[in-house]
Amino acid sequence: LIVDDRHGVIYCYVPKVACTNWKRVMIVLSESLLDRGAPYRDPLDIPREYVHNSSTHLTFNKFWRRYGKFSRHLMKIKLKKYTKFLFVRDPFVRLISAFRSKFQLENEEFYRKFAVPMLKMYANRTGLPASVSEAFSAGLKVSFANFIQYLLDPRTEKLAPFNEHWRQVHRLCHPCQIDYDFVGKLETLEQDAAQLLRLLKVDKLLHFPPSYRNRTASSWEEHWFATIPLAWRQQ
């Protein structure tokens, strides 16, 4: 949960659901990051490497270090008084988006931490290259079916919780415990973002950045899941 005390806003970010640009919006609102001594005014001016740096944002996790025994009481007050929002999308399409960005593009961290174990366990590969570039050059890539097997394997979370890029929304944002004031959808992002900024009374301060990246389309779901057995999809 990212907190903006200046405007009384709490945002629960869900990776692969426009979270980069919503984090940019929160930085502008909270004035938590300066550019040559002045706060950023345009979300798109904020470099991507700062957006996902946890030190840039005030989060509930930091309350414990800052306020000690008073942190729980402060969190309850903010959760009651502040406007709370999150954005969601079709969960199957979110999985496709996570797979495309983390396993179809060269990503050293995700190759070593996730792709290598998946290839060993679900593709019976051994003697895998040490780097992702070597693996890609050799045609060694995790398949979408391997990824789904990994998600469904009960052994996976015995080792560690799901990575946030494919962790379920209810486990990231706890909507049954937190009474969100606004739940937007990626499928209607432009309209929902404009409505939310009006609700927050900040629509005169900034606009939600347009997305020019190749967003995973909902229409791809049938194609990507065509080879996934029905029993797996139902799980």
Image (spheres, rainbow, N blue to C red):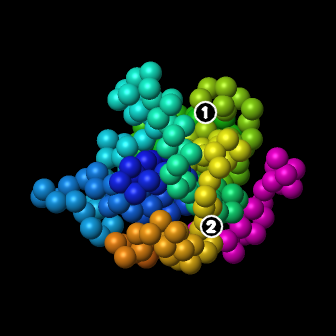
Looking at the image, the residue that sits furthest to the right is: 231
Please give the residue where the numbered disc 1 appears in the rendered image: 161
Q: Is residue 25 magenta?
A: no
Please give the residue where the numbered disc 2 appears in the rendered image: 185
Q: Is residue 234 magenta?
A: yes
> Where, by quadrant of the figure, is residue 195 drawn?
bottom right
Q: Nearer the viewer, residue 23 or 4?
A: 4
Question: Picture coordinates of residue 218 (x, y %)?
Answer: 67, 71
Residue at the spot x=32%, y=61% of the render? Answer: 28
Residue at the spot x=37%, y=43% of the render? Answer: 58
| Spatial CA span between label 1 and label 2 | 25 Å
Label 1: few (<14), some (14–19) or many (≥20) C-alpha neighbours in 10 Å: few
Magenta stretch?
A: 215-235
> In the image, is 149 to the left or to the right of 131?
right
> Where, by quadrant of the figure, is residue 213 drawn?
bottom left
Label 2: few (<14), some (14–19) or many (≥20) C-alpha neighbours in 10 Å: some
Question: Picture coordinates of residue 226 (x, y %)?
Answer: 78, 64
> Where, by quadrant of the figure, is residue 62 drawn?
top left
Q: Nearer the viewer, residue 69 or 133?
A: 69
Question: Picture coordinates of residue 231 (x, y %)?
Answer: 87, 50
Q: Nearer the viewer, residue 21 or 108?
A: 21
Q: Is 17 above or below relative to 213?
A: above
The amino acid at mark 2 is: Lys
> In the image, is 5 to the left or to the right of 105?
left
Residue at the spot x=61%, y=65% of the render? Answer: 184
Can residue 100 be seen in this snapshot?
no
The amino acid at mark 1 is: Pro
Q: Is 176 above or below relative to 28?
A: above
Q: Nearer the viewer, residue 126 or 47?
A: 47
Looking at the image, the residue that sits furthest to the top is: 69
Mark number, residue 42:
none
Which of pointers 1 and 2 lies earlier in the amino acid sequence?
1
